[in-house]
Image: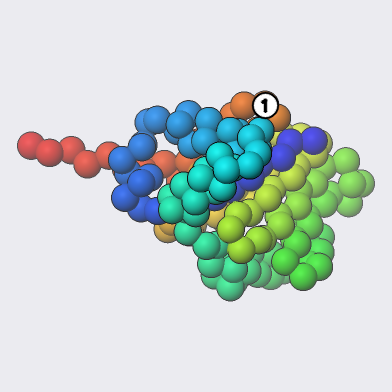
Amino acid sequence: MRAYQIYLIEDEVAEYYYGRERMFYDLFIEYFHVSGRLKQIIRRQIEYITKPIPILHIQYLVGQAFAKKKELIVEGHVYKFRDSDRTNGVELMIGENSLRLQAWGKFDSESAFLEILRKYDGRLLAIDFENERYGWIKPIKERKYI
């Protein structure tokens, strides 16, 4: 199973740290491994660089994309999409501060939700902590100055 934690990063922070996504990964990993006062400090840093997830907007995008699909199961803020044989599937859990995407089966099973999230105009950073992978769902276009 593959699991991605997805955060909405403040625009200015995302643009400044574009190409240095490893720093975000290191910050989140450190938060999960420390305790006490340091954990509080890192939590404040994470709160500063992230924005709340626009739950209604994400729900609208998912609803529009899967309007005619019977395989989509909705349970509160959890959206499940499975093949008929249940060997491939994906779950999207919408939280206030992050999204959690879990996928199993073929490696393209999560692409259904990732394509939907790409339509959102925010700076969404996906992190797979288990496999140490991270990146922007919708890469930021670099400005070229002449």
Colouring scheme applied when the structure was drawn:
rainbow
Q: Is residue 36 shown above or below 72?
A: above
Q: Which residue is drawn at 89% across and 46% down?
A: 86
Classify residue 55 by image quadrant.
Answer: bottom right
Q: Residue furthest right?
A: 85
Where is residue 73 shown, x and y percent of the image? 81, 64
Q: Which residue lies furthest to the front in this view?
A: 37
Classify residue 141 by image quadrant.
Answer: top left
Tell me, yes or no, if residue 123 can be seen here: no
Where is residue 61 shown, x and y percent of the image? 58, 66
Tell me, yes or no, if residue 117 can be seen here: yes
Where is residue 10 shown, x and y percent of the image? 40, 53
Q: Which residue is drawn at 55% across and 54% down?
A: 117
Q: Nearer the viewer, residue 35 or 13?
A: 35
Q: Quadrant of the C terminus?
A: top left
Q: Which residue lies furthest to the left in this view?
A: 146
Q: Nearer the viewer, residue 110 or 123?
A: 123
Classify residue 31 by image quadrant.
Answer: top right
Q: Is residue 97 shown above or below 107?
A: below
Q: Residue at x 47, y 59 (%)?
A: 51
Q: Which of 73 and 75 is in front in this view?
A: 75
Q: Quadrant of the N terminus?
A: top right
Q: Which of 34 and 72 is in front in this view?
A: 34
Q: Is residue 34 shown above or below 40?
A: above
The count of marks equals: 1
Residue at the spot of label 1 = 131
Q: Which amino acid does label 1 sit on?
A: Asn
User: Which class describes the residues within 10 Å of circle 1: few (<14), some (14-19), or many (20+)?
Assistant: few
Q: Which residue is drawn at 40% across and 30% down?
A: 20
* Local secondary structure at mark 1: loop
